[in-house]
């Protein structure tokens, strides 16, 4: 009963305050003006709440509702504070969404409808009991997202991707594309992907058993020697987190350019860096700037490496060409089910924008540019692991295919259960790194990495490369 009373008070106060303020967003509000207005609104909410509690008390006395009277009398400072906070969030922030934005354990917010909401908390998907007051309130929140990102969502443009001020990625889909979860024709769907502010390091990933020390040492050598790398995996497999972690292997003296759709990369170890972000403009398509254009611009910025947050389409060709034209050590991520599938995904992406390029030429380009594929997977116990580190060996002209061979593979061991996945990262006994030239060029076979190189590289290939160098 107390919960219902709190909800009634919250809704009543919110409705009255909205009406008093006309629920209008000031267009060009400065930070100082916003803070002053927030103080003003907080005071209005406080006064309105006391009035509503008094009104509810009088009504309960007239009805002789002793239980309600007792609950209203016993409302604590915390109870009132929660009501005021929820009202303020509904008016000045993002309503119910703000509550979950404040929880660092929530990584995904999925709004299927105003009263059908799920969150991902600590890797577990769960429904929540709270809901927006109405479909109109949810629509107002959606309009706030799009207004802040200078886009718009409507029947003519029912799908919008944008970001929040904390870097969270937002996808909005409305009718007529989205239908109501209750069977109606009007749907409003919002999916928010949040990114933890805590920076993951390789040491932490090792501690969390996302990869082994041996694999980490090998990756350090490969990155130091400027191998081109693709980090692949499914949605939520931890690709961006892993990319952030391995970026610390890049020497601090290098200049890097990062290119993203959403500002997710947190590369803190490099000072000489340039961050580029795409821009989506619905009102004026000419003002939109995509990844392809940013990659071409990045090539004029004298980068040592280019890091593309994620390739999804025709920009894959520009990324491969950058890798093939003196920008060794570049890294990107992509969605795929395994390392071999990542090659096929790249082929498809390139064909989306370059249908006139023969497939064998595309495969040859991929093989020339991409040398290592690190595949991640989210396991049944919700943990994220490196499941394979593979070499893109060569292009097989005879069979018209790209040969990919694993160097390391994650294999579950006897300690693994249904609830907890345990395993080891095992070297492939039948394959060692064939593309060793970059190891030789970097002198890795002669410096402190020598022991790692000897265990990683194919002995015959290493011997031939060093003989050729001599």
Image: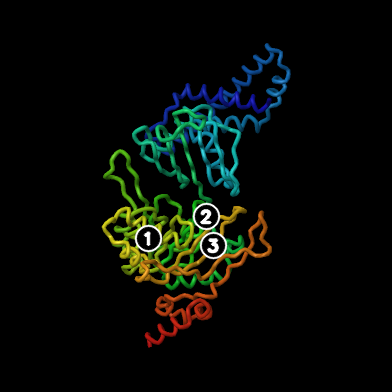
Q: Distance between the Cα atoms at labels 3 and 2?
A: 9 Å
Instruction: Residue 311: name its quadrant.
Output: bottom left
The correct choice, above or below, for 165 with respect to 443 in the image is above
Which secondary structure lies at badge 3?
strand
Q: Residue at x 45, y 83 (%)?
A: 460
N-terminal of the pair, mark 3 or mark 2, is 2
Q: Distance between the Cα atoms at labels 1 and 2?
A: 24 Å
Q: Which residue is mark 1?
A: 257
- Residue 380 in the image, given as x and y percentages of width and height: 60, 53
The correct choice, above or below, for 348 with respect to 457 in the image is above
Q: Quadrant of the N terminus?
A: top right
Q: Nearer the viewer, residue 35 or 307?
A: 307
Q: Nearer the viewer, residue 87 or 377?
A: 377
Q: Which residue is mark 3?
A: 386
Left or right, 458 with respect to 416, comes to left
Q: Nearer the viewer, residue 31 or 2?
A: 2
Disc 1 + disc 2, Cβ < 8 Å? no
| Residue 317 tag number | none
Q: Which residue is mark 2?
A: 237
Left or right, 292 with respect to 163, comes to left
Q: Distance between the Cα atoms at labels 1 and 3?
A: 25 Å
Which secondary structure lies at badge 1?
strand
- Residue 227 in the image, given as x and y percentages of width and height: 42, 70
């Amino acid at each position: 009963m107390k919960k219902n009373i709190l909800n009634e008070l919250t809704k009543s106060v919110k409705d009255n305050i909205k009406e008093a303020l006309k629920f209008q967003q000031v267009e060009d509000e400065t930070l100082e003006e916003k803070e002053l207005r927030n103080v003003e609104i907080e005071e209005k909410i406080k006064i309105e709440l006391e009035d509503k509690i008094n009104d509810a008390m009088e009504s309960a006395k007239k009805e002789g509702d002793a239980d309600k009277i007792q609950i209203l009398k016993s409302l604590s400072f915390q109870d009132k504070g929660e009501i005021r906070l929820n009202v303020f969030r509904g008016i000045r922030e993002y309503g119910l969404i703000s509550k979950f934005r404040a929880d660092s354990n929530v990584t995904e917010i999925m709004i299927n409808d105003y009263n059908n909401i799920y969150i991902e908390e600590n890797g577990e998907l769960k429904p929540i009991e709270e809901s927006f007051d109405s479909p109109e309130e949810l629509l107002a929140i959606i309009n706030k997202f799009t207004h802040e990102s200078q886009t718009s969502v409507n029947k003519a443009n029912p799908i919008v991707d944008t970001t929040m001020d904390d870097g969270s990625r937002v996808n909005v889909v409305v009718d007529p594309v989205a239908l109501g979860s209750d069977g109606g024709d009007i749907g409003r769907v919002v999916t928010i992907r949040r990114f933890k502010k805590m920076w993951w390091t390789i040491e932490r990933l090792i501690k969390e058993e996302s990869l082994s020390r041996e694999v980490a040492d090998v990756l350090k050598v490969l990155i130091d020697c400027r191998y081109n790398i693709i980090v692949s995996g499914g949605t939520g497999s931890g690709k961006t987190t892993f990319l952030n972690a391995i970026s610390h292997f890049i020497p601090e003296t290098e200049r890097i350019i990062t290119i993203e759709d959403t500002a997710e990369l947190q590369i803190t170890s490099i000072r000489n860096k340039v961050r580029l972000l795409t821009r989506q403009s619905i009102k004026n398509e000419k003002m939109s700037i995509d990844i392809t254009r940013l990659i071409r611009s990045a090539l004029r910025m004298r980068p040592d490496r280019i890091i593309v947050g994620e390739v999804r389409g025709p920009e894959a060709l520009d990324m491969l060409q950058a890798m093939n034209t003196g920008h060794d050590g570049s890294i990107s991520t992509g969605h795929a089910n395994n390392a071999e599938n990542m090659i096929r995904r790249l082929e498809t992406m390139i064909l989306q924008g370059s249908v006139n390029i023969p497939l064998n030429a595309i495969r040859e380009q991929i093989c020339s540019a991409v040398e290592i594929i690190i595949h991640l997977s989210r396991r049944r116990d919700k943990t994220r692991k490196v499941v394979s580190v593979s070499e893109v060996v060569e292009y097989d002209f005879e069979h018209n295919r790209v040969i990919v061979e694993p160097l390391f593979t994650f294999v579950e061991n006897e300690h693994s259960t249904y609830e907890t996945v345990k395993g080891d990262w095992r070297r492939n006994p039948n394959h060692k790194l064939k593309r060793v030239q970059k190891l030789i060029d970097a002198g890795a076979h002669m410096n402190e990495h020598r022991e790692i190189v000897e265990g990683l590289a194919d002995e015959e290939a290493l011997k031939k490369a060093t003989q050729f160098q001599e």
